[in-house]
Structure formats: structure tokens, C-alpha cells
Amino acid sequence: MNFEIHSGRAVVLARDDIDTDQIVPAEFCRRVVKSGYADALFANWRKEPGFVLGRPENQGASILVAGRDFGIGSSREHAVWALKDGGFRVVVAAGFGDIFRRNALNNGLLPLDLPYAELGRLTGQIAAHPGLEVVVDLRECTLRLGGTCWQFEVEERGRRMLLRGEDAIEAVLQHGGLISAHEARRPAWLPTVG
Amino acid sequence: MSRPTTLADKLWDAHVVHAQDGEPDLLYVDLHLTHEATSPQAFDGLRLAGRTVRRPELTLAVEDHNVPTASQEVTDPVSRLQLETLRTNCAEYGVELYRLGHARQGIVHVVGPQLGLVQPGMTVVCGDSHTATHGAFGALAFGVGTSDVEQVLATQCLTLERPRTMAVEFTGALPPEVGAKDMILALIGAIGVNGARGHMIEYRGEPVEALSMEGRMTLCNMSIEAGAKVGLIAPDRTTIDYLAGRRHTPTGSAWQQAAAYWQTLRTDRGATFDRTVTIDVSHLTPLVTWGTNPSQVVPLSGVVPAPDDLTDPGERAAARRALEYMDLTPGTELRSLPIDVVFLGSCTNGRIEDLRAAAAVLDGRTVHENTRMLVVPGSMTVRAEAEQEGLHEVFLAAGAEWRLPGCSICLGMNEDRLTGAQRCASTSNRNFEGRQGDGVRTHLVSPQVAAATAVAGRLAVPADIR
Ligand code: SF4
């Protein structure tokens, strides 16, 4: 599914440093599949009464707005799969864990960085216009809500992968000759397993 | 002469297969480590696309995250399917697997180095965030997600943007009973859980050089808890002595060649880092985390801090939430906190030296009656070594559980999980909410503190129980 422009309702989970153990607790990472993780998404936090993602008015939201530094910690890609299974296409935060950001881009989920102060403005606008759709345009790298527009940046490789659905592995396999040439240069003492 | 270069950049440059302006580099992977939890979907991806594993002999698989550590019997069907999936995948694609019961099975970051598979100058990738552990050998080691595991299996390469470089200079002399765990917690406390985001750290200075390879692995292991992509240490005599004679290290003239090359792997004089952080360890004391991320850390001799003292509103809110989750009140002495469970193990502190340090504190003493202590060696090899030295007898005589290797309650994935509002002093690396079980409160500590705490039944340093 290519990502050019997406509009949807936003839900605000105003916490900083949300780690991937919160997004998907470890017990769910025993599954061997890549989808069907909607039940795993924030499974422990969902047990808290009034948890924002459980509220009726937030059902169907497709843009998650968090605080600073979303997706730190464990490399589990299950966190990205669960967000997608939970209906999310975009996560907006002031910074992301490096591995999470990469996993997201590898799976068509857009990690959208805004400076912390702008994040505050955005959440203010969302609160002021409940239910109003947010529009994310990846071709122009803009996020719009009502009359306000924010510009954002995404690394080029990730952006291309989202826009064109480019196959990352196929792109590397194109360089098969260069890979073989590198292999021929490797010192003979390097270990092999077995 | 070429421009003075940092060690991390040298290693990076030596592995670039393809570079193009404005594009990430294509980097060759010398060793790929994998396990049952983050690989099934990667092998499925290969199968769906009809691809093969490019270099099966450069991948090692182990079973660690989801193995039971009380016995070798896997009763839960979901866990069994995950382990069996890894076995099928490894058989189908010709990947070596150390499965449950194998004499070399254990935690991925303990097994690789022990076998001599990780050597200076290599690139190492694993679908696990603590892969920087291998940086202790002067290797460039990255943690990645499952899509990238698939890419490495298919191509033996990774497409990556070059991270920035960061020097962490440790200065001063490390006081006794303060170790690598306290050093890394001190760094994370100083720069925060995102302080090294996007950087390759090189740990430098005399206190680092004085560490054993086990200590260096503890230090590099938690680089991710400061957000770093890589954490490494230049190889030296200690590194070379550790590697000599291991299962996969070169022999004869190849050993001479390799060792000569390894000695060139240093940051050039005059090379500049994008950032430098200095940590003086002369007055460092044993540390303990009080909150729900590893940067929320204080001296064990201190008290639970007050959120109101924090100036940043975000940090203040996070501290309040952490205190609530941890059921702590500002001003409480950490030494007064009763501990239900002590966990000695994990890829941070499950190595032989960690077990020795804890056993030395426990020797001739008993675990407090209200406390349960689990000792989970990092690998079968560590377990056998410990048993040869009689360490298991010390643990058993003290009333601790002597278990089988695995990740166990470091992450609470299977039945090795705590329940309810238990308070755990843990030698692992993450004190996130629910990490060791829903509602469980984790305090990260060193092996020495873990052992003293088990005896005291409350957070304690070794001097407290002597
Ligand atoms: S011991 Fe813990 S941190 Fe280390 S690999 Fe296992 S689960 Fe991850």
C-alpha cells in the first residue's frame, strides 16, 4: 500500500519516552506471524481505566500523536506491526528510537518528527477541534490541521519506500556484483560458523 | 597522510560495499546472530519472495528469549511453535543452531563472544537491541528489526546512514566494588535515554582499559539504553588475550596476521568526534534505578528523588508517573526498600565474572527469608564453568535457584515472569514498566549489589552485610 497522502483522525497519547515494551509486551512476541497484533497494542496500558486509546471517541483514529522520543528500547518490529494492525498509518512525535524509526519505514508506517514546541501546538489544535481530520502529505512533507500547516522531514530512502512501495531487499540485490567484490577482499582469517 | 579518523569511522569505511551521494551506505555484515523471537517473520519473507540465505555460514542462531530456565521442557504451545519454527527455518536454510539442550546454547550476546566468533574489526548484526555488546571487541555491532534481519539473510548487507561519532571519556580510578554496570548507569543517568541517539560511542580512558572483557561487554551492552546505535572499545592486550585459543579464533600464521591488524584498530591521534562526554569515576558509588527507565538512577546510599526538583516539565511528569508505578515516595531511603526477588543474569550480567562477583558476596551467607533469588547463567558454557568452580554450590547453599541459561525474567516473555506488584532487584538492563511482568517494579543493579540485596532482603551494598 503506497503512502502519498493520508487523512485521518488523530489521538493524543501525551507521554514521553514510550518504549516498545509498552507498545507490545514481550509475551505477544512469541507469535511467529507478522499480523494480527491489534490485541497486543499497549496491552498493559489498555487495562488502565480511561486509557486514551480505549475511549469510544478515539476508535478509528489513524494518526497517533505521542510526546518526546517514541519507540525507544527493544528492537521488536512487533511494535510497528501492532500499530498498523491497530489502524495507524502515522505516528507523530518529537524524536523516535533509531530502530523503531527504521522498522516503521520498512513497514509503511510513517514516523513523523515535529519539534517539541510544535508538537504542543499540534496537540492544542487537536484538542480545540475534536474529530477534525489531520492531513499528512508525504509528497510535499506537510501535515495540516484546520488552517495550520507544519513542514516535516523524512530520510529520503524511507520516503521513497513509502511513496513507491520500493522493495528494500530487491534494491540491495541489484548490487550483487559489488557485494561479491567485497567478499573477495575480506581477510581469510574471518570466522565462519559451524 | 590521510586525515585522522575515529575507530568507528575506520570500521565503517572498511565495510562499505557501495556508497552514493545523498544515499545511505551499503554495509557488509561479517557476522549475523539470530534467535527465535525476531526471526520467524524474516525467514517467512525469504520464502514468500523465493530468496535464499546468501551466506548461511555467517549466521548463527540460538534459542534464548523464549526458553524455559527451570527445566528443558517447553510445555506452552505458543512458545513451542516459536522454537520449532526456528528449528525448521535453520534446517531449511542451512543455518547453524544451538538449540535448547545444546552444550553451547545460551543468550545470543553471551554465546557469540565466548566462541571467539566476534573479533576486532568485524561488523556484527542481530535482531536485538543489545547487539552493541559485541562492540567490546572493537567490532561495529548494530541491533536491527526483523525486516533488516531478512535483508541481512538475503544479502549479507545492510543499507544504513552513517551515524555520528561520540567519545565517552571515563577518567579517574574506579573505587572497589564499583564496576562496569555502575559506569554505564552513570553515563545513562548523565545523558539520558536518548542522549546518544544517532551516535556510535567509543568508550575510552583508563577505567575502560582496566576492565576485563566481561566488564567491557557489560559497558557496551547498555549503549542502547542511552539511545546509541553502536558502543565500542578499541582492542588491546586484554582483547587479544581473551580471544586466544577460542573455538573460532584463527590459529598459526593467520593468528599473527589477525592480531597485527587488530592492533591498528584505534582512533588516530587528532581525530575529532562529533561529541565528547566526560565521566569522572573516582567518586562513583554503587548505583540503582528508582524509576521506569535506566536514566532514572541514583546512588544506592541516597534517597528517592523528588519530581519537583526537576526543571523540565516533561521530565517532571515522567518522574511522577514513574514514582506512582514504582510505588515510591520522594525522600525514602533506597536501602529501606524490601526486595521480593533478586535476578542475577541476562546479557548484561550473566557472564562468569558476574557470577563470581555475586558468589564472593554470597559465600557462607543465606538469602533473606522474604526474598527469592534466581541465578540464570548466560550460557551453557558459563553454567559449566561456574559448576567447575563450585559457584553453583555457593548459590544453592545460600538458598538461591540455580537455573538453566536463557533471557528469563530479563524480559518476562514466557513463564519466567514475575507477577503482581513484586519488587525486583535485577542485574539486567531495562526497568521499563511491565518489563519483568505486568505491574512488577524493577530496580537495576550490579551483580555485587544483587547478591548483597538478596542477603539483606532490602537494597544493599556488600559492606552492609559484612
Ligand atoms: S537477556 Fe534480556 S536484554 Fe539480553 S538479549 Fe535477552 S531479553 Fe534481550
Image (cartoon, rainbow, N blue to C red):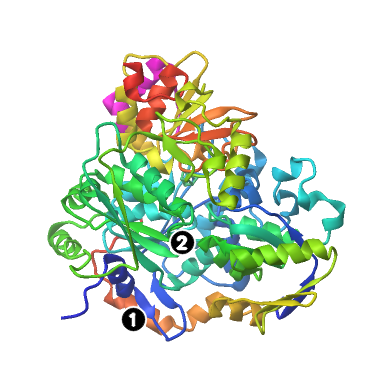
Residue A104 appears at what percent x and percent y?
61, 66
Of all chains, the one bearing label 2 is B
Looking at the rendering, the stretch of residues picked out in magenta corresponds to B385-404
Q: Who is closer to the viewer here, A86 or B415?
A: A86
Q: Is residue B273 above or below residue B317?
A: below
* Residue at position x 43%, y 37% in the image: B298
Figure label count? 2
Tell which tag, 1 or 2, sits nearer the viewer.
Answer: 2
What label sits on residue A181 in the rendered view? 1
Number of residues whose C-alpha sits closer than 10 Å to that of mark 2, classed few (under 14), some (14–19) or many (20 or more): many
Residue type for callout 2: Arg
Name which quarter of the figure residue B358 lies in. Answer: top left
Of all chains, the one bearing label 1 is A
Q: Who is closer to the viewer here, B63 or B20?
A: B20
Q: CA distance from mark 1 to mark 2?
A: 33 Å
Q: Who is closer to the viewer here, B464 or B367?
A: B464
Residue B302 appears at what percent x and percent y?
42, 30
Mark 2: secondary structure: loop
Viewer can see residue B416: no
Q: Is residue A193 above or below residue B173?
A: below
Number of residues whose C-alpha sits closer than 10 Å to that of mark 1, classed few (under 14), some (14–19) or many (20 or more): few
Residue B292 appears at what percent x and percent y?
55, 41
Residue B284 as seen in the image, left or right of residue B153: left
Q: Are marks 1 and 2 on the same chain?
A: no
What label sits on residue A88 in the rendered view? none
* Residue at position x 20%, y 44% in the image: B210
Residue B356 as seen in the image, left or right of residue B323: left
The residue at which mark 2 appears reads as B197
